[in-house]
Image (cartoon, rainbow, N blue to C red):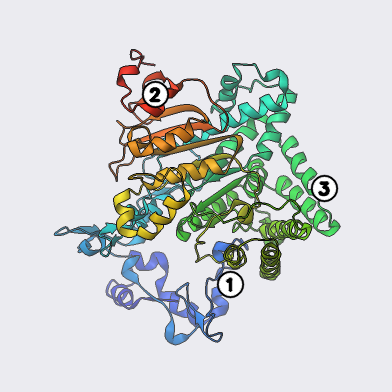
Amino acid sequence: MKPDNRKFRSRNKASGGRDPHYNITNLYRYEDYFRNPAEVLALFSQIPFLNGGLFECLDKEDKDHRAKILRIDGFSDRADNEACVPDFLFFSEEQEVDLNESYGTTNKRYKVCGLIDIFNRYKFTITENTPIEEEVALDPELLGRVFENLLATYNPETRATARKQTGSYYTPREIVNYMVDESLIAYLDTQLKERIPPLQDMESLTQLLREVFAYTEKAHPFNPEEVKALIEAIDDIKILDLACGSGAFPMGILHKLVFILSKLDPNNKEWRKKQLAKADEIPDSTIRDRAMADIEAAFERNELDYGRKLYLIENCIYGVDIQPIAVQIAKLRFFISLVVDQRTDEARENRGIIPLPNLETKFVAANTVIGLARPQQAVLRNSAIDEKERELTRVRKRHFTARTPQTKRRCREEDRKLRDEIAALLRSDGFPRETTEKLAYWDPYDQNASAEFFDPEWMFGVNRGFDVVIANPPYVDSEMMTRTEPDSRALYSAIYKSASGNWDLFIIFIERGIKILKSNGTITYIVPNKLIAARYAETLRKILLEKDVREIRDFSKVNVFKEVAVYPIIFLIQNRDGKNPITMTSMKSLDEVSEQNMIPREIFYKDTDWAKYLAPKTVL
């Protein structure tokens, strides 16, 4: 790739070589570097190898013409086919341009300037959870905002922005924090009571957990036995965001769990012991020794949070979204989160930087609401299937830490071979050919593709459900679906009980989340208030009433999503029998309670006009 610096050569000459934009970027040297590769390599010699699938070339062979290379990245090593990026995209004074076609507007003028000039107005921080008082500071959460705005492109065929068509809206941080905290508190409360029976009748346990979650210097209130149980519960947790977008909820969960571990286990003694114990169970001595060495390096040579983050990412947090670009941005945010906690050591190879993990089997692009057709499980399942699936799990764990192109290539070849073998065995065990072909053809390492199905066991190795399912599902109404996806709407209606009447897309996302939830697991979503008001949601409300509906938090009077007129609520439900009234909390801002009441469970299903049942207003 080469810059188009003709304008800047002439501009710099005219300014006597003093043009600030020109000198800042040393554009006058670009052509020399591109003529001398050795100098280019010298410039980058001090940059450590980072790894991670985001930095791989996406170009690939054309399946129909092996000699042809598909240039997905837009780059080329052919001199007559190099990408040419206009300089004005990076350096240009503010000017008015006509973007009406791009934004779906008419007779509007938009002011724009060069990208570097825009960046110069801000201060950047690389840690998302660092409080910055200056309004001009930006952190990696900005990536989510960038993704949101990429979705604003107008589609003249559907007469809608991509954002409206996909229903993707960025979740405010206050909402993320609340949903993350409440779902994790519910999980840890349940786990502590299961692991330490004397705590089962302890009503104040939830409040004690809130003390651990609070950003204060106050010591936590748990004894060593309870701390050990909490760390074990965190190590065991499986969390899924069913519509992860650019990763707001997974990042919020990561930061909160890291913070809790720092309070419970400030020196990582117990957390490290847990990771070493798992590595010690690896049967292959060579792989086991390497895993042990990696764990020691992760904890010894980096900041305390690095070891916490790395093994939470590897074992606990998962995300799925139908849009590959969203998944890529989510992975990038996790990469940045790991990089900032690594220490450099000039005396070590690669400056002491441990290459980033590969997250292809932690965040996947797929259609969340379409599962796999599985036959009734045979009494005697072919044991060869179980062994092959265990082997596939081991291959993907090796790929997670693979640090060279050769190792990754071997893992991916083994992965493909095992997928084919498992598909053949499943077919002989009674699985439909259509299902086995989907399993075999799904390639987790194809970063450009989005699978037409989602299967947690096949994609993540999670076959017993998730402890926490969290999401901001797409806000796509029935009218939009009928216009843009009539075939999909008919298919979903045949799959989901809740897809009755004039249903919107979030309805089936809720039912899907319930289906993949563990017993006693927690599901929390932010969805339109139609869930508690619309007649078409009655079937779903009946399904939810079979569970323990802990709380509904109503944000209908709060402008949560500035880009769309949606009146949202948040619900928190545990997958167990529920008999108690439902706590209904009305909000007057993102974090301020207006009133709170208890709604009888039978009313939640039968009557959408709740005003006559509410107790007198109680301002908290």
Mark 2 element type: helix
Among the 4 quarters of the image, the one containing residue 391:
bottom right
According to the picture, the residue beneath numbered tag 2 turns out to be 603
Identity, as a three-letter code, of the amino acid under mark 3: Asp
From the viewer's perspective, is 3 left or right of 356? left
Residue drawn at the location 40% of the way across and 72% of the way down: 27
Residue 101 in view here: yes
Residue 577 location in percent, x, y?
Answer: 56, 27
Mark 2, other Cα within 10 Å: few <14 / some 14–19 / many ≥20: some
Pointer 3 residue? 280
Frontmost of labels 3 and 2 is 2
Label 3 – label 1 distance at C-alpha: 42 Å
**What is the three-letter code of the residue carrying label 1?**
Ala
Distance Cα–Cα, label 1 vs label 2: 71 Å
Which badge, 1 or 2, is on the more N-terminal residue?
Answer: 1
Spot occupied by residue 178 in the image (x, y as percentages of width and height): 47, 32
Q: Is residue 178 visible?
A: no
Q: Is residue 224 left or right of residue 483?
A: right
Q: Nearer the viewer, residue 191 or 496?
A: 496
